[in-house]
Image (cartoon, rainbow, N blue to C red):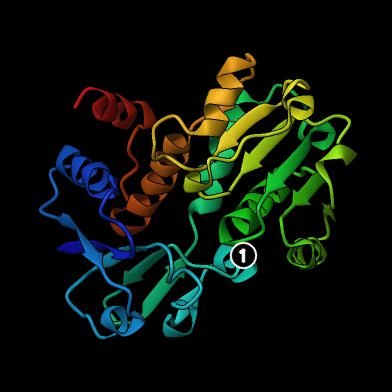
Amino acid sequence: MHFYLFGYPIQNSISPKIHNFIFKQFNLDHKYFLFETKKLNDIVNYTNFKGASITIPFKEQILPYTNILDPASLKIGAVNTIQKKENQLIYGYNTDWIGIIKPLILINNKKWKDTSVLILGAGGTARAAIYGLKSVNCSQIYIFNRTIEKAGLLASKFKCNFIENLNQINEVDIIISTIPAAVNYTLPNEIIKLKPIIFDVNYYPKTTALTQQAINFNCKYVKGIDMLIYQAIEQNKIWTKNEMDFDKIKNYLENS
């Protein structure tokens, strides 16, 4: 059976490496390929697949073409996983939120009701982050975005807070950045000195400017590769009913 990553640009994606490794571990005769396109119709009209990962720019565009959506994708308003079932219906899922919250559960030592989180950005990944945080009853969630109106709309939708200026932050436990790596975003020193856990969701490059800043200031941090692996494990569980061990995948990627 064939599985794909649909999106653009995806030439640097390591999703095929992860999924083909998982297929091999369970002795499955499946293959995962890149399908790079800028046209939604290329995806909608393509039929030779059992399941697929959906990435930019199609996570929201694909919604009308799915027949059944899981609760997460309905609330987040984005799909990153589709599955074609025997009845030819297309099921849509969102596993990004799992990829975000799982590594944070492992590194956060505070009770979630007492944890304050700042989210940088207000797009689809930010929505997934908020959904994940709400799933563990985190109530102190703040959104900061260059476009204040967009941050306000997102805060209203998820019943959380937005800030207009980072100077408003006096204390924060976790900062999740959904800002594209190409921006080379870093935080003001006054914020990083608060020693928050830094989570940059980008996995390319391996060490982003923000992650390097966290290292320089001795902050705990989560790398984007952890999100990618955890969400991929969940995708594969949807497609094949098999659940792969995180550490096996991480070790494979680090040593190959």
Is 117 drawn above or below residue 173 in the view shown? Answer: below
Q: Which residue is mark 1?
A: 76
Q: Residue 119, percent across and down?
A: 70, 46
Q: Quadrant of the C terminus?
A: top left
For this orientation, the residue located farthest to the top is 218
Q: Residue 115, percent across and down?
A: 79, 33
Element type where label 1 sits in the image: helix
Q: Residue at 19%, 46% (x, y): give it.
A: 20
Q: Amino acid at mark 1?
A: Ile
Is 91 drawn above or below residue 135 in the view shown? Answer: below
Q: Residue 238, percent across and down?
A: 37, 57
Q: Residue at 79%, 26% (x, y): give it.
A: 190
Occupied quadrant, residue 160: bottom right
Occupied quadrant, residue 47: bottom left
Q: Residue at 89%, 40% (x, y): give it.
A: 168
Q: Residue at 42%, 84% (x, y): give it.
A: 65
